[in-house]
Image: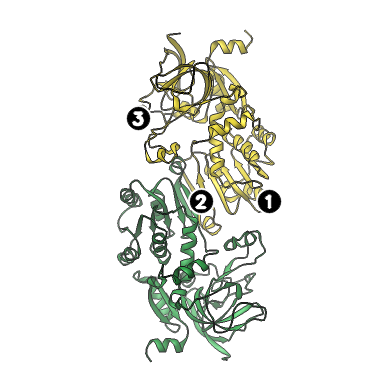
Chain colours: A yellow, B green
Amino acid sequence: MNTSMKALQWHGPRDIRLTRIAMPSPGPDDVLIEVAYCGICGSDLHEYDNGPHAIPIVTPHVLSGRIAPLTLGHEFCGTVREVGANVRGLSVGERVGVEPEYRCSRCRYCQIGDYNLCNSMGFAGLMGDGGMAEYVVTPAYMLHRLPDSVPFVQAAVLEPAAVALHALRRSALRINGTCAVFGLGPIGILLVMMARLQGASSIVAVDVSPERLAAAARLGATDVIDARSVSAGEIASMVRAMTGGGVDVSFEAAGLQETFEGALQSLRKGGETLMVGLMQRAGFDAFRVVNDELSIRSSVGYRHVYPDLIRLVEAGAIDLSAIVTKTVSLERAVVDGFDVLTRDKRQIKVLVVPSGAEWRKRMGA
Amino acid sequence: MNTSMKALQWHGPRDIRLTRIAMPSPGPDDVLIEVAYCGICGSDLHEYDNGPHAIPIVTPHVLSGRIAPLTLGHEFCGTVREVGANVRGLSVGERVGVEPEYRCSRCRYCQIGDYNLCNSMGFAGLMGDGGMAEYVVTPAYMLHRLPDSVPFVQAAVLEPAAVALHALRRSALRINGTCAVFGLGPIGILLVMMARLQGASSIVAVDVSPERLAAAARLGATDVIDARSVSAGEIASMVRAMTGGGVDVSFEAAGLQETFEGALQSLRKGGETLMVGLMQRAGFDAFRVVNDELSIRSSVGYRHVYPDLIRLVEAGAIDLSAIVTKTVSLERAVVDGFDVLTRDKRQIKVLVVPSGAEWRKRMGA
């Protein structure tokens, strides 16, 4: 076994370094994984651009015990290479998807199964080492075995797909219902795919990028609205016209006051806006919300959705690789991944391939 | 039968007139009621103070066909005195409670039973003649027969109690759950009573009036917070301390940005604020709402709750007259009712007795 490995580590804003670090060794409840893919998430971009936001720099995270510098990346999958003494049900050589939420299993939220609200919640790849490295050690509870028919390129998208599926499950969207998705980043596009799977009759996709609107239309949107130079109110009027008076559910997946406003205004009476994007403060027309009995609900992370997602992929009901627009090597991850994602809205999901050997094989070298 | 009657009619802001008008006559689907009591609602005060808000002054309401001037009062009950030709199941002399929402029964909302969201929704007493008169004609569908054991003084409070029960039913409050009620007007006090009936383990009542806090404590609140000279954040800290980390549900029943903020901040993770008070715009910390998966829901009017309420009163499970602090004659309704309610926060619910004969009997004259 190697004694060192390559890892992409966050040291500070605009300071992500590809370095060689010591090969990690799993504790008794941990597993060592050889990473196949690690996706780049919007929150990774925020940490890169103007972090730290979630990355601890003073007080170590209570569950991971870690502090920056640490390895980025929470959307990863790979192969089990070493198993801690206490770990049952996982063997060397098995392929796994990673549900990267740390949890204490003891607080009131963990006790009722709402472990995404755990008082000590954190993410591998933000509060502890993540998947932008050749190898990573994670707690065994984060791992889900992958059937042979689920390829790594789809397993790498399980994490954002889990965000979308959890949001959809928390929403009031039902079979033959109507919805609108505001913001077609990876989560928005995955919400379009999930809404289709849920049997929605109308799925209106709203964004400012023609490429993303085209992708949404290809992946399940029944209508698209190009939001460039159109106000929130005008978009809402269009949505209402398209859906006979407004949608049952609108998803706010952009994290902007304007899209939140448009999402609320697009609802029928009794409808619900599900917030999944992050923003600071938000304002709304409370008079209409009360008089029309609207709901504003929210969704963060996920719980209990990985097994279902894996089965959906296995059954061929959904192809998560549909949102992958690019793969890059660990060496080129910042330049061809982080930097490109920041400026090129045609890119939806970029995957990093940490293994040099694997990357060379793909390149045919 | 008389050919004219006394009615308290809204002509404009600060212009409510006690006048004699022609005795109304029921159409084929209507019923003539001799009014026993009519409560004064906060929305009546708003119409009096700086209306019109809901009262039509240009376009007649689509279902009532009415426009100002019209008789105020939507919280009323009385005795059936005449029945239209098409009306089945109601007889002269029967005592009735009134559910004063106009509805079309044909729109998509009426069709699914959400008739409080009816596209033509309105209230008798705001969009048509109400109960501050000796007699009133209402559509028969608004009426609920009262058992002998339900006295008029409780039946007059059915309407605000319906607002509270509908709000409670829409909320996530469950047996042994925890809640906070912000704003102890009639709806807030009734919410305290309903939450107790629902088996809540903690009911924190928040207001600026010592008398209303005392009433809440008497009627079911487990804790009270005097909000005078305390910030929303401090109140939220107190609620969290009282309830081991925050309540499951907080009710916003004051219609103020500050109470809305306090209500949201008082929640545990995964909790819900139920807005029942009316305000214009509202703002909130969206970052916390999403990260803690909080919900903001709302409630307007009521649907399907009158039969249950009447049964609760009949069973002695709740005494709606507990919130009645004063009764006044129709002649003194403005001076001793509207004006007093505006300035004296010790008053919770004031009932008007429209019948001169009944009033003289009560006064022992």
| Rendering coords of residue A290 (x, y %) | 51, 57
Cβ atoms under marks 1 and 2 closer than 8 Å: no
Residue A284 has which mark?
2
Instruction: Where is residue B342? Give x, y as percent.
Output: 39, 71
Q: Are marks 1 and 3 on the same chain?
A: yes
Q: Quadrant of the C terminus of chain B?
A: bottom left
Residue A62, labelled with which disc? 3
Residue B322 position, x and y percent, is: 38, 71
User: Gap between marks 1 and 3, in whole Å?
Assistant: 50 Å
Give the residue type that dot 1 points to.
Ala
Give the residue type at disc 2.
Answer: Phe
Q: Amino acid at mark 3?
A: Val
Q: Residue A154 appears in which quarter of the rendering?
A: top right
User: How many residues crowd around disc 1 within 10 Å: few (fewer than 14), some, or many (20 or more)?
Assistant: few
Q: Vertical placement of B165 versus A161: above or below?
A: below
- Of the 4 image quadrants, the one containing the N terminus of chain B is bottom right
Distance in Å between CA atoms under marks 1 and 2: 22 Å
Q: Which mark is residue A241?
A: 1
Tell me: A70 left or right of A223: left
